[in-house]
Amino acid sequence: MQGDRGYLDKVKIFFAECFLLGLFILFMRVEHIIGILILIFGMGACWYIYDKLENVQISIREILKREKIFSMILTFVILVCVPIFLKDSVYLLNLCIWAGIYVMLATGLNYQIGSTNIVNLATAASYGIGAYTSALISVHTGISFWLVILIAGCASGFMGFILGLPTLKTKDYYLTLVTLAFGLIVYLVLNNLEFTGGPNGIGDIPPPTIFGYSFRQDLHIFGMTLPYHVNFYYLVLFLASFYTLISNRLYHSRVGLTWNAIREDEIAAKCVGINTTNYKILSFVINCFLDGMTGAVYAHYVSFISPENFQFFLSVVVVTMVILGGIDNVFGVVFGAVLLTLLPEKFRVFQDFRLMLYGVIVIATLIFRPKGLFPQKLRKYAEG
């Protein structure tokens, strides 16, 4: 009986994830504005119905809990197969890569906004430092990308440590202003220093290579020829999956619990012996380290970077993704990042109003869905 239920659970998960894959490919393929609106309203209606059916939610959670490993493996396999369905469109593959990059940035920022309640508006700065560190080292020394990406992460992590020190003297919106100012300082430094290329940026950044295979070569597999963008897609997919796995483990660890204690009441956390200083700096360092690695991937993907790629607007976008998806919910943050990467591209007619639209999304979310589309999960502990 138990085996039959397990088999049925796997079948349900398989068809559900295949349906979601088909829906995603359809959404990516549709270009006409009417078709896009129909799909969005249809998905919104399905989401509204699902949100109201509590019994269905409980049933789905129980199935996913019983078949957690199978569900994760199947999801990864499906994501690996996505480029096969989009191989004829470099534009759509590029969108998928950008979605993965934003997932990586939003996952890192969630340690602060979600777990510790530190509104950090310096994401563009840590992301840019990682990109410039990677680009400068690669262009001038020729060191392998696989080592440079770690160096870039360490450089941004050190920046996070430096940024965390003065913010310990502030809190609430004063802390946010410090991070905002720091991001502007980094932008001005990158824009005015000679060795960073100033406003002209850095070009000819070499692609990653592995065993002599360049990531800018087309991929030949199973008789198919896939554009070189697929190589970067798989790199981003691997790193985004790694970031997500680390985030999930940290959430369930003592560190994640301590961050949540600081978020709920910092004074009470101090009273029970928590060193809030060290844990807040730790959140800065981890966030910036991941941002730095992400910046390195971005620099080697586009092969040219300039200060214009790391303006304040980028930080606003990532904050919006975390808030929309659901703070301190790893799945929600991933969903928010993907959603806010794809939707603006589908509505390119409103390109000039993009910043305003992000502001409207934040305000609407805080009013109608203050905990995000996927609210943070309640912690559960085994009895005894």
Image (cartoon, grey):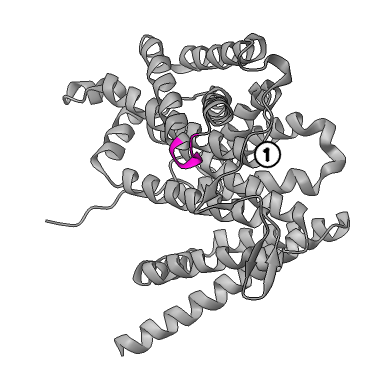
Q: Secondary structure at mark 1?
A: helix
Q: Residue furthest left?
A: 384
Chief secondary structure of the magenta portion = helix
- The residue located at (75%, 55%) in the rendering is 90
The segment highlighted magenta reads 143-147
Q: Is residue 371 at least partly visible in the picture?
A: no
Q: Is residue 333 at least partly visible in the picture?
A: yes
Residue underneath mark 1:
302
Tell me the kind of residue under disc 1.
Val
Give the crowd class for mark 1: few <14, some 14-19, many >=20 residues within 10 Å: few
268 shown above or below 188:
below
- The residue located at (58%, 48%) in the rendering is 100
Q: Is residue 145 shown in magenta?
A: yes
- Quadrant position of residue 80: bottom right
Q: Find residue 255 and report its horizontal and vertical position in percent.
A: 27, 37
Left or right, 319 with reference to 293: right
| Residue 251 vs residue 197, the one in the foreground | 197
Q: Find residue 62 and report its horizontal and vertical position in percent.
A: 38, 69
Q: Find residue 347 and report its horizontal and vertical position in percent.
A: 81, 45
Q: Is residue 129 shown in magenta?
A: no
| Residue 322 vs residue 239, the one in the foreground | 239
Q: Quadrant of the N terminus?
A: bottom left
Left or right, 38 with reference to 265: right
